[in-house]
């Protein structure tokens, strides 16, 4: 992945670690990297702890959720690489098209491990998860409880992008989609049925430059190309379409992509 000087080093380390892995943790079927970064986003609430062997634990939580959705990473201080990461979450939207979440009594701890990193070395993440934020501690045993703990190894099967399944069959298969991306579900769901037939919203951990380079190098090539900052348009196989890329202000290590077929 090409790094952007505008993205914080920690965000870039998270995207290198998670790649194109996805899942339903804070919201349905989104990039794991984005959900980890979101869980670490509150800088006023960020804590760090020095650990043996040159490691460091960084943690924080999503401000609107009183600590019920939080994240932590184990970082190698020498390389800056993420060795393991964890989310405390409510499996929002899992196995369902809805955004329904588990209650506080059934929180899930998901621990993600770099290949070769033994789960026993991730014990600091387990200990961190048990430090329930004050706002989540109810009286008479009604506070947050970690009901399930799962371990996931971040091997190539997890971190490599899978083929995109077009959610709307009316969206032409003649339009090539950036291969290292996934459907940006929450944004796609916001489209009207009519617009979803010709617009597809994607996300990637690659840069806008990498996305646009893919479309500039298509074979057969695009015809009648128009291109400027973060945008390219042209026609291929008699079909005209455009590709726009944007970097969210609060998520500079992620690129949003909108592919639109001309009317």
Image: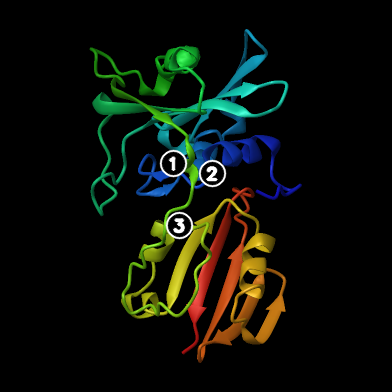
Answer few, some or many: residues within 10 Å of disc 3's Cα (few below 14, many 20 plus, some between 14 and 19). Answer: many
Which badge, 3 or 1, is on the more N-terminal residue? 1
Residue 87 quadrant: top left
Residue at 71% of width from left, 26% of height from top? 79
Q: Nearer the viewer, residue 183 or 26?
A: 183
- Residue contact between numbered discs 3 and 2, judged by CB atoms under 8 Å: no
Q: Which residue is mark 3?
A: 182
Which badge, 1 or 2, is on the more N-terminal residue? 2
Q: Secondary structure at mark 3?
A: strand
| Residue 170 coordinates in the image, percent (x, y) | 33, 79
Q: Which residue is mark 2?
A: 19
Q: Nearer the viewer, residue 31 or 48?
A: 31
Q: Is residue 201 above or below residue 48?
A: below
Indicate left or right for 235 with 133 as reference. Answer: right
Q: Which residue is mark 1?
A: 158
In this view, the mark in front (3 or 1): 1
As drawn, the residue found furthest toward the front would be: 219
Q: Nearer the viewer, residue 186 or 63?
A: 186
Q: How many marks?
A: 3
Q: CA distance from mark 3 to mark 2?
A: 11 Å
- Residue contact between numbered discs 1 and 2, judged by CB atoms under 8 Å: yes
Which badge, 3 or 2, is on the more N-terminal residue? 2
- Residue contact between numbered discs 3 and 1, judged by CB atoms under 8 Å: no
Answer few, some or many: residues within 10 Å of disc 2's Cα (few below 14, many 20 plus, some between 14 and 19). Answer: many
Residue at 38% of width from left, 44% of height from top? 23
């Amino acid at each position: 992945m090409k790094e952007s000087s505008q993205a914080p080093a920690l965000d870039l380390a998270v995207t290198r670690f998670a790649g194109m892995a996805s899942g339903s943790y804070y919201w349905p079927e989104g990039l794991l990297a984005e959900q980890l970064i979101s869980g670490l986003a509150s800088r006023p609430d960020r804590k760090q702890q020095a650990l043996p062997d040159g490691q460091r634990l960084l943690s924080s939580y999503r401000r609107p959720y009183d600590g019920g959705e939080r994240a932590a990473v184990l970082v190698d201080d020498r390389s800056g690489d993420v060795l393991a990461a964890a989310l405390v979450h409510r499996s929002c939207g899992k196995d369902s098209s809805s955004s329904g979440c588990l209650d506080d009594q059934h929180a899930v701890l998901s621990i993600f491990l770099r290949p070769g990193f033994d789960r026993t070395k991730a014990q600091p993440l387990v200990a961190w998860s048990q430090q329930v934020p004050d706002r989540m501690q109810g009286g008479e045993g009604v506070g947050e409880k970690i009901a399930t703990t799962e371990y996931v190894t971040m091997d190539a099967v997890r971190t490599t992008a899978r083929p995109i399944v077009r959610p709307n069959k009316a969206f032409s298969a003649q339009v090539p989609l950036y291969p290292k991306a996934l459907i940006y579900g929450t944004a796609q769901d916001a489209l009207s049925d009519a617009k979803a037939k010709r617009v597809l919203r994607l996300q990637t951990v690659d840069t806008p430059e990498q996305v646009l380079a893919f479309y500039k190098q298509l074979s057969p090539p695009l015809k009648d190309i128009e291109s400027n900052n973060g945008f390219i348009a042209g026609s291929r196989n008699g079909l005209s379409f455009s590709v726009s890329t944007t970097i969210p202000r609060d998520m500079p290590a992620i690129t949003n992509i909108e592919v639109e077929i001309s009317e």
